[in-house]
Amino acid sequence: QVQLVESGGGLVQAGGSLGLSCAASGTIDSLNFMGWYRQAPGKQRELVARIYTGGLTNYADSVKGRFTISGRNGKNTVYLQMNSLKPEDTGVYYCHTQHRNNNYWGQGTQVTVSS
């Protein structure tokens, strides 16, 4: 079992910044990747960013150049720095990972960007 605990999020004006963090714990030996998804009201959950054990990252096109995912370095912790936030970034952000072909999700944290 893997537990993901998120922190951060909140309310910010457009153009502002927020940071999210996620720590994994439990019966884990290694996690190939950790990442963030988000879900806006009435929309499907979408991948925002992911970081792999070797440091490789990938981002949704909509956040490239504005969001930065970091962490790992041998630890099961990941951070998402979100800059130049837009109202369309509003949603519930979920930390995600896989372990032994099982998906694990955090409880979700709300990010609201006002215009």
Image (spheres, helix red, strand yellow):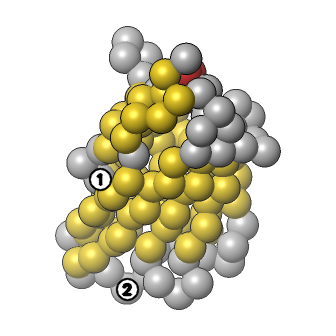
* The disc label shown at residue 58, or none: none
Q: In whole angstroms, how far apart are the C-alphas of marks 2 and 1?
A: 18 Å
> In screen coordinates, is 21 left or right of 48?
left
41 or 20: nearer the eye? 20
Disc 2: which residue: 29
Residue 101 visible in rendering: no
Residue at 65% x, 45% y is 83
Residue 58: x and y, percent? 70, 52
Q: Nearer the viewer, mark 2 or mark 1?
A: 1
Residue at 68% x, 37% y is 84
Instruction: Say which element carries label 1.
Output: loop
Q: Amino acid at mark 1?
A: Gly
Instruction: Please determine whether, in this image, residue 71 is positioned above or below residue 109.
Output: below
Q: Amino acid at mark 2?
A: Asp
Figure quadrant of residue 53 = bottom right
Disc 1: which residue: 106
Residue at 24% x, 66% y is 3
> In screen coordinates, is 42 left or right of 70?
left
Q: Earlier in the sequence, mark 2 or mark 1?
A: 2
Residue at 42% x, 29% y is 112
Residue 58 visible in rendering: yes
66 or 93: nearer the eye? 66
> In screen coordinates, is 56 left or right of 90?
right
